[in-house]
Image: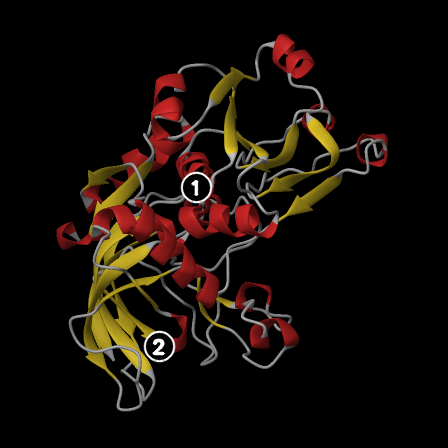
């Protein structure tokens, strides 16, 4: 066991505070990672405040982890000391179900083990990346290419793969019109990736406040959803809409922006249920779908793609003492576009 400093929420809705946690001893197939940077995801806030249901406390959030390997188990074959690596939203799965065998560990039918607010196969609660070190099975670690700065790469482990996976699955590319709903931590990555894939990209945001950023990051068009004219002008326009919004929406209105056979894919998860008139999907044979993160293989593919295209997250680097303020700023949409914790300050 190794004792490491971390920042944890001691109870639901309580401010995060500095503490220490125990990391397991490095096993035969484990990798010990010195965490250098950890991104702050909106889902960290949902879970630390029990917005998505009952959670495990004390909780060390963080599933956008970038660091350097400092020790490997005797059976590790993929990594050596000094390698630049990342850890995303999951750290284990059953490895036996059809989804795991197909490289879709995020949809493990027996339940993937989440990086934090989960229970590991040893029966112990998992703790995430707001910490100095983490021990992870090598099969759930990815390599960060040399072309990516570690601080800008950290958010790719959630925001990057969460948007890359549906864009790939629904074939975003040349000749496709893709809309990104929401211009935040996930949305700005969706814009960059969809643009790099060759799609015609439109941002749908509540206001035009971030229009210059959207166009700079690769959007071809930018529209305000607060303007009713937007829904008239863009009716029947898109092949794919990726919604990164974690607040309830009028799904029917957005489904109206799709072409026949278009898809509205949700990667943002509101805390409240949403309602839908089914004629919104029946007319036009439209698809309302959801998408989680990607499997390990796809996450590595995404990192390699981002390195090839020079894509990193737009970040604001903060000290660990600023985490609680950062949470409030995320809730106020006051970040462009991802807070990243310099874990040397923990």
Is residue 271 something one can see in this rendering? Answer: yes
User: Which label sits on residue 27?
Assistant: none
Disc number lying in front (1 or 2): 2
Whether 288 is drawn above or below 25: the answer is above
Task: Please state, as top left, top right, bottom left or bottom right, where the N terminus lies in the image.
Answer: bottom left
Residue at 68 percent of width and 45 percent of height: 289
Q: Which residue position is annotated with label 1?
A: 42
Neighbour tally class for label 1: few under 14, some 14-19, many 20 plus, Cα within 10 Å: some
Report how far apart the C-alphas of labels 1 and 2 lie in the structure. Answer: 27 Å
Say which of 337 and 101 sits in front: 101
Q: Quadrant of residue 107?
A: bottom right
Instruction: List x then y, in percent, for residue 123.
Output: 47, 78
Give the colouring mode of the picture.
secondary structure
Residue at 52 percent of width and 74 percent of height: 93
Say which of 38 and 155 sits in front: 155
Neighbour tally class for label 2: few under 14, some 14-19, many 20 plus, Cα within 10 Å: many
Whether 284 is drawn above or below 157: the answer is above
Element type at mark 1: helix
Tell me whether the residue at label 1 lies in contact with that at label 2, contact meaning CB atoms closer than 8 angstroms: no
Whether 195 is drawn above or below 224: the answer is below
Tag 2 or tag 1, which sits nearer the N-term? 1
Q: Which residue position is annotated with label 2?
A: 138
Residue at 57 percent of width and 13 percent of height: 226
Instruction: List x then y, in percent, for residue 332.
Output: 40, 26
Say which of 199 and 53 sits in front: 199
| Lateral position of residue 274 relative to residue 163, left or right | right
């Amino acid at each position: 066991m190794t004792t490491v400093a971390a920042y944890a929420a001691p109870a639901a809705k309580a401010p995060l505070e500095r503490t220490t946690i125990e990391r397991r001893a490095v096993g035969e197939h484990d990798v010990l990672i010195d965490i250098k940077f950890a991104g702050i995801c909106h889902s960290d806030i949902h879970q630390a405040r029990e917005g998505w249901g009952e959670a495990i406390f004390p909780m060390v959030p963080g599933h956008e982890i970038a660091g350097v390997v400092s020790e490997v188990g005797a059976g590790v074959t993929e990594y050596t000391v000094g390698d630049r690596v990342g850890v995303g939203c999951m750290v284990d799965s059953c490895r036996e179900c059809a989804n795991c065998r197909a490289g879709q560990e995020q949809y493990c039918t027996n339940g993937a083990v989440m990086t934090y607010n989960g229970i590991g196969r040893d029966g112990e609660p998992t703790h995430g990346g707001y910490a100095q070190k983490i021990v992870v099975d090598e099969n759930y670690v990815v390599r960060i290419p040399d072309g990516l700065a570690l601080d800008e790469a950290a958010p790719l482990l959630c925001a990057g793969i969460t948007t890359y996976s549906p864009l790939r699955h629904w074939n975003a590319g040349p000749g496709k019109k893709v809309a990104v709903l929401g211009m935040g931590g996930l949305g700005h990555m969706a814009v960059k990736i969809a643009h790099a894939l060759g799609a015609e990209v439109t941002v749908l945001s509540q206001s035009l406040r971030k229009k210059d950023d959207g166009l700079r990051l690769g959007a071809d068009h930018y529209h305000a959803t607060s303007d009713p004219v937007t829904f008239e002008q863009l009716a029947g326009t898109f092949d794919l809409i990726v919604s990164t919004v974690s607040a309830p929406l009028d799904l029917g209105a957005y489904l109206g922006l799709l072409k026949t056979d278009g898809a509205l894919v949700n990667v943002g998860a509101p805390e409240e249920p949403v309602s839908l008139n089914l004629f919104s999907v029946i007319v036009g044979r439209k698809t309302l779908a959801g998408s989680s993160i990607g499997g390990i293989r796809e996450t590595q593919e995404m990192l390699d793609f981002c390195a090839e295209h020079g894509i990193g997250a737009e970040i604001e680097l903060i000290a660990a003492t600023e985490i609680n303020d950062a949470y409030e700023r995320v809730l106020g949409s006051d970040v462009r576009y991802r807070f990243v914790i310099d874990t040397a300050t923990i």
